[in-house]
């Protein structure tokens, strides 16, 4: 038997023996996610139905018929009840098999809200679906509102908040690493906040209207007794499940304490002892070692990755989730995901990525979006021509006055159109124009700012021309494309924003190309298309991007008049929106 086979055998033995309860099965994450999505859609349709209540009870009844077509059909009902069972079972398994209860605050609230859902939901389930099945109760909104308003208004409002809040946090955790999510995050946030507010407004409006209608037929004493017994059974079952979960957690903690201990040696941090089968990320959290994990240890990102410094032959093989992520990032041999790697023997590792935000708690998972996002942005690269010749005959004070005046005006021009100065380069700067999900805004704003920059240069030449050896000239390169916007600094409250990636490199190449082409502005084809301006009359040329070993097409604008003609045509045609809005 090889060392690898031995390690696999140890891994299997640990799993079967219960010492590795938190390892999970790769498909569990998928089933837990999509069953949660089904329940989120169910709750969403329910809240939409409530929101219709602002138009009256009759509107709610009409909308309910459409909702029932989905969820009361054989397929819809099977999907819903299957999702309920799968999500609750797998979520409880994940909770009771946690190796540590140290967690990010958002994960804590997700778990807390999830545990509160059955507390708030039992009375609602009894008075609706169980009442219908048990005593043939009327499920119309007229009858339900009579039961709920106003006696259970606060309780039902709590149910809306905990159920929707749990789902929103879960959806955010599941999809925030997808590239498409950044484009939809703002509309999704508006929807996530607006829908429960409208649902509660509809509930209040319809409840008040319904209270003025004749009361429906009252339930008999026998029917009420049946429902009370059903409620007692459900509450008893929930209490039993809660006690069982607490027992499993306590038993697991005792088993882990009694289990064989292994040593995890962190390069630069020293050794720690943890029960065999604890993941590297859990070991870090247990011992307060700063360890980044944007996805919270779900295997959806690679920020927790470590470099294994000890023998690789003793490691368990990556599971499906880990293998897919390692392949995606092109990981080198010895690099593993700390959240998925559960060593069965002593191991030495090096954490590859630092925790950003040194003033924060070491165990708090920092949102990836807080430190870096990727979105379509437009980069404007500005460079003064012959800066040394311009300042050679000037006194230091005169140079300081010129530079401060110049860049103060440039900053105003950039910020007027919603951009920001990313970096000053002595005789130039990089400006970024971006708006989430709107590349047109960035491209148009950059071109409008370039037009203002050209006017600033003309004004300065008039005002300061007599004291300058040569006129002030500049080259501007503009490009639009996927850009990483990252915070640079220890504290996100005071960190500087910086644009990174190929888009910046291409914008710099565009600016460099203005020197060879003897023009003032070079606008990439991508930026021109994104802006929506008419560049058809402008000559194109190829621009070599040597650092990327690529060639890009660009529009060469000889001077400010050529640029202003492009912008002016769009404005005259009524196509130019207010870019500074």
Image (cartoon, rainbow, N blue to C red):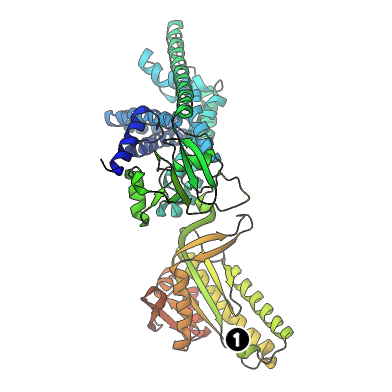
Viewport quadrant of the N terminus: top left
- 185, 106: nearer the viewer: 106
- 274, 172: nearer the viewer: 274
Res 568 seen here: yes
Is residue 33 rendered to the left or right of residue 558? left
Disc 1 residue crowd, few under 14, some 14–19, many 20+, Cα 10 Å: some
Hey, which residue is sitting farthest right in the picture? 397
Viewport quadrant of the C terminus: bottom right
- Residue 342's x, y, as percent? 40, 40
- Residue at (46, 14) in percent of width and height: 236
As drawn, 502 above or below 226? below
- Residue 425's x, y, as percent? 58, 76
- Residue at (27, 43) in percent of width and height: 2
- Residue 532's x, y, as percent? 43, 70
Quarter-wise, where is residue 125 in the image?
top left
- Residue 367's x, y, as percent? 52, 49
- 147, 432: nearer the viewer: 432
As drawn, 509 above or below 101? below
Please give the residue where the numbered disc 1 appears in the rendered image. 387
């Amino acid at each position: 038997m090889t060392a690898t086979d031995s390690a696999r055998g140890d891994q299997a033995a640990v799993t079967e023996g219960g010492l590795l309860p938190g390892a999970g099965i790769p498909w569990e994450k998928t089933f837990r996610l999509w069953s949660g999505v089904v329940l989120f859609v169910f709750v969403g349709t329910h809240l939409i139905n409530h929101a219709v209540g602002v138009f009256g009870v009759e509107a709610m009844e009409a909308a309910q018929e459409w909702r029932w077509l989905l969820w009361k059909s054989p397929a819809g009902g099977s999907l819903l009840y299957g999702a309920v069972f799968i999500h609750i079972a797998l979520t409880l398994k994940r909770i009771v098999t946690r190796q540590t209860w140290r967690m990010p605050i958002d994960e804590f609230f997700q778990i807390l809200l999830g545990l509160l859902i059955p507390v708030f939901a039992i009375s609602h389930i009894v008075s609706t679906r169980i009442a219908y099945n048990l005593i043939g109760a009327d499920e119309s909104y007229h009858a339900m509102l009579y039961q709920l308003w106003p006696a259970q208004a606060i309780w039902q409002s709590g149910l809306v908040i905990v159920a929707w809040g749990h789902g929103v946090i879960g959806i955010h955790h599941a999809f925030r690493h997808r590239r498409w999510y950044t484009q939809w995050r703002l509309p999704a946030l508006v929807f996530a906040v607006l829908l429960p507010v409208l649902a509660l407004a509809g509930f209040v409006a319809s409840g008040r209207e319904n209270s003025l209608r004749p009361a429906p037929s009252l339930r008999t004493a026998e029917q009420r007794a049946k429902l009370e017994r059903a409620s007692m059974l459900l509450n008893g079952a929930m209490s039993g499940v809660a006690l069982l979960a607490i027992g499993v957690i306590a038993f697991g903690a005792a088993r882990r304490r009694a289990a064989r201990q292994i040593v995890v040696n962190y390069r630069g941090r020293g050794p720690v002892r943890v029960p065999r089968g604890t993941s590297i990320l859990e070991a870090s959290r247990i011992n307060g070692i700063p360890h980044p994990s944007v996805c919270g240890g779900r295997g959806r990102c690679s920020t927790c990755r470590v470099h294994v410094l000890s023998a690789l032959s003793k490691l368990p093989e990556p599971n499906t989730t880990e293998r897919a992520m390692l392949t995606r990032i092109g990981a080198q041999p010895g690099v593993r995901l700390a959240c998925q790697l559960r060593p069965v023997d002593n191991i030495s590792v090096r954490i590859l990525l630092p925790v950003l935000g040194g003033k924060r708690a070491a165990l708090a998972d920092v949102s990836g979006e807080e430190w870096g996002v990727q979105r379509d942005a437009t980069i404007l690269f500005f460079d003064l021509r012959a800066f040394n010749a311009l300042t050679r005959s000037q006194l230091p004070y005169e140079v300081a006055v010129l530079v401060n005046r110049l860049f103060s005006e440039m900053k105003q021009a950039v910020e007027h159109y919603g951009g920001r100065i990313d970096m000053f380069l002595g005789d130039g700067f990089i400006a970024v124009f971006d708006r989430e999900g709107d590349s047109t805004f960035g491209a148009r704003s950059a071109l409008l700012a370039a037009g203002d920059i050209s006017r600033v240069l003309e004004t300065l030449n008039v005002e300061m021309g007599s004291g300058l050896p040569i006129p002030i000239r500049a080259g501007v390169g503009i490009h639009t494309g996927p850009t990483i916007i990252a915070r640079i600094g220890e504290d996100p409250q005071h960190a500087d924003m910086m644009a990174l990636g190929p888009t910046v490199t291409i914008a710099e190449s565009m600016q460099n190309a203005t020197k060879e082409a003897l023009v003032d502005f070079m606008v990439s084809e991508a930026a021109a298309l994104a802006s929506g301006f008419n560049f058809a009359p402008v000559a194109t040329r190829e621009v070599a991007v040597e650092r990327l070993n690529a060639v890009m097409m660009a529009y060469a604008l000889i001077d400010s008049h050529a640029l202003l003609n492009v912008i002016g045509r769009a404005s005259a045609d009524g196509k130019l929106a207010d870019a500074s809005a």
